Amino acid sequence: MPTTYFQQSALRRYLAETGEVWLFARRFFREAIRRPFEWRELLHQCYIVGNQSLFLVGMTGLIMGLVLTLQTRPTMEDFGAEAYMPAMVGVSIIREIGPVVIALICAGKIGSSIGAELGSMKVTEQIAAMEVSGTNPFKYLVVTRILATTLMVPLLVIFGDAIALFGSFLVEHVKGEVSFRLFFNKVFRQLSFGDLIPATGKTFFFGFAIGLIGCYKGYTSQKGTAGVGRAANTAVVVASMLLFVIDFIAVLVADIFFDL
Amino acid sequence: MEPLIHIANLYKSFGDLDVLNGFSLDLFDGENLVIVGRSGSGKSVLLKCIVRLLEPDSGTLQVLGQSVPALSQYEMDHLRTEVGFLFQGSALYDSMTVRENLEFPLRRHPEKMKGHVVEDLIVSTLKSVGLAHTIDMMPEELSGGMQRRIALARTLILRPRIILYDEPTSGLDPITAKEIIELMLQIQKEYHTAALIITHDMDCARVISNRMIILIDGTNYAEGTYAALSKLPDPRVQAFFK
């Protein structure tokens, strides 16, 4: 019996929280189109989100490109297909690996940072202080952060993809003596709009999910400093899981419209 | 005289826990009304209801003649500029400098500048609390007492008519606490504000109060001046004065 009780209780909590996230997202859309707009804070948050993750995304992209090429090359050589390496790596990185891995890195870096920051502001009553001074804290803190992640994650993914392709080129250049021009010619010849548009489009949803979950967890955090830690932690876990769900849906939709 | 804050039969509960049980008060212009009560007696809940950080379950709650629960969000935001709130932990925005902390509410309510330059208002308000030199410092660089003063300056920058103090001297050493109390009196003279102060600190209550309310079981258990209450032969009241 206890198992059933806990299962029901966990299910109820899950459903209740899903509903709360939905209401939180609805409030975001409502507040985002209402004046006044916090342009200055939005630009500030875009700078923080971009600047904070640039080095990490660059490093991840470079290693991703190096490792993918190093590990795939021997197999391609066995089949005498090493000439297809740039095309294969390009499609893999642009379509799937780049967006998902870099979004996961962003979920860890940005999602936890937003969750912890807002959670800490909540428990130290800074959010309440904004509210009692006649300022809408949701608009100032939440709307700007969600918009910033929605706009910046795609740019970070494009940057990370470019670095990953460069990493792949480095391996190809050393092992196969492929020139920079030939490598990127082969990459771009293989890519079509069907690869680029869904891959870039889904990163906006990734950014939105990272911002939404980070803000929701932080803004609604409770139970003091322990709650702040929990907010940061669950922001990463939930956002990461959500990224895979969004990715799956994006692949299904892309398959319908772009005949992958 | 019309009260600035009028509360009658206010009820607020959290689940099965009744916190406010028909509490009533009137705060008049220029008055310092102190509410004392034990921890968990609902003092902070009362202040949060006044600025609508919490919604009361029932009762009358009017601030400057306006019914707080009935106001739209826009009207409430406007009303909040007339009611300053000093939080127990100061609640300074820790990612902003002192200047930015004071600038933050002012930029969002430019009507409150009344032709003044932002910088002049910030400097003059900081001078009022004796901390003009901290203008470019971060909150973490300030002591607890200084943070409380800056929080008070941030409250004053919108020139409110009423200030709500939530435990203004808690967590401070006796000397700093005395300085904060003196500052509160000075602020009242300079800015002509009314104040609703909740505290455990009976020294603070003695020095600052014109009138006091003892909050027990969510109601006004006793009411009067400090001198009158201190002589009341009720053990539950006397417990606060020992």
Image (tube, rainbow, N blue to C red):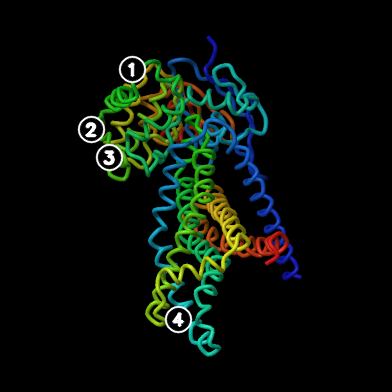
Count residues near mark 3 (Cα–Cα under 10 Å), then give few for <14, some for 14-19, many for 20+.
Answer: some
Residue type marked 4:
Leu
Chain to which the residue tagged by mark 3 belongs: B
**B235 w.r.t. B75: above or below:** below
User: Which residue in the structure is indicated by mark 2?
Assistant: B133
Q: Nearer the viewer, residue A111 or B132?
A: A111
Give the label, 1 or 2, closer to the camera. 2
Where does label 4 land, which residue? A70
Residue depicted at 72% across the width and 66% down the height: A7
Q: Which of B210 and A192 is in front in this view?
A: A192
- Callout 4: few (<14), some (14-19), or many (20+) C-alpha neighbours within 10 Å? some
The subunit carrying tag 1 is: B
Query: Label 2 amino acid?
Result: His
Image position of B26 with respect to A244: above or below: above
Q: How far apart are marks 1 and 2 (CA)?
A: 20 Å
Q: What residue type is labelled 3?
A: Met
Is there CB contact under 8 Å for labels 2 and 3? Answer: no
Secondary element under disc 3, as helix, strand or loop, is: loop
A161 relative to A64, above or below = above
User: In the picture provided, is B131 more to the left or to the right than A214?
Assistant: left
Image quarter hosting the N terminus of chain A: bottom right
Q: What residue type is labelled 1?
A: Glu
Q: Name the residue under label 1.
A: B190
Residue under circle 3?
A: B137
